[in-house]
Image (spheres, grey):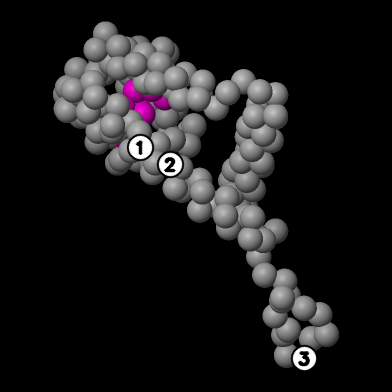
């Protein structure tokens, strides 16, 4: 059922219910995933950092990264990432070093402690992924969901950059 606009012969259809469902699901999944990380950190007796900071370590991965790279990848925003990096450095999960070619940039690298936690999170991810099963229809569904979410990300990014077109 749509809305009829006064003086117009056409009907305005409501926004797609599947779109709203996926937006709500993405938000809920993110919060849920942070809960999963919190539970795993408790299980491992890691009490000095939070789930968001653990996810940051996982996203840094094995490479040296510059803070700007994390922001450019779209994972984090300004003061939030700065605060979390400060805490991760303070608790010796990260080391920081000024870049030789650009003294304004700071390179981040996981310490051994940070690498161990990153690996544990990777193991958790592999364990959780194995719970989905390997059936081709499951894999096809995940591929389709991934493509749809990437398309949604592009649409939102274009809106942020260019507004309504």
Pointer 1 with pointer 3, Cβ within 8 A: no
The kind of secondary structure element at disc 2 is: helix
Quadrant housing the N terminus: bottom right
**Mark 3 Cα-neighbour bin, 10 Å: few <14, some 14–19, many ≥20:** few
Q: Position of residue 118 (x, y in %)?
A: 35, 17
| Residue found at x 67% / y 70% | 14
| Residue found at x 67% / y 61% | 16
Pointer 1 with pointer 2, Cβ within 8 A: yes
Q: Nearer the viewer, residue 97 or 158?
A: 158
| Residue found at x 29% / y 41% | 79
Name which of mark 3 and mark 2 comes first in the sequence. Answer: 3
Would you say the magenta stretch is mainly helix, strand or loop?
helix
Quadrant housing the C terminus: bottom right
Q: Which residue is mark 2?
A: 30
Residue extending farthest top: 112
Residue extending farthest bottom: 7
The kind of secondary structure element at disc 1 is: helix
* Chain part drawn in magenta: 52-59
């Amino acid at each position: 059922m749509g809305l009829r606009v006064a003086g117009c012969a056409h009907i305005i259809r409501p926004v797609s219910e599947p779109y709203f469902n996926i937006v709500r699901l993405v938000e809920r999944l993110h919060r849920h995933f942070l809960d999963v990380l919190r539970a795993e950190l408790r299980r491992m007796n890691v009490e000095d950092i939070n789930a968001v900071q653990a996810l940051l370590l996982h996203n840094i991965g094995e490479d040296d990264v510059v803070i700007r790279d994390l922001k450019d990848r779209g994972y984090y925003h300004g003061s939030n990432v700065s605060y979390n990096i400060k805490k991760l450095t303070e608790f010796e999960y990260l080391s920081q070093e000024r870049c030789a070619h650009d003294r304004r940039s700071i390179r981040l690298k996981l310490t051994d402690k940070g690498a161990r936690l990153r690996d544990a999170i990777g193991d958790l991810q592999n364990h959780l992924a194995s719970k989905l099963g390997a059936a081709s229809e499951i894999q096809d569904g995940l591929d389709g969901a991934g493509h749809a979410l990437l398309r949604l990300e592009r649409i939102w990014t274009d809106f942020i950059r260019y507004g309504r077109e």
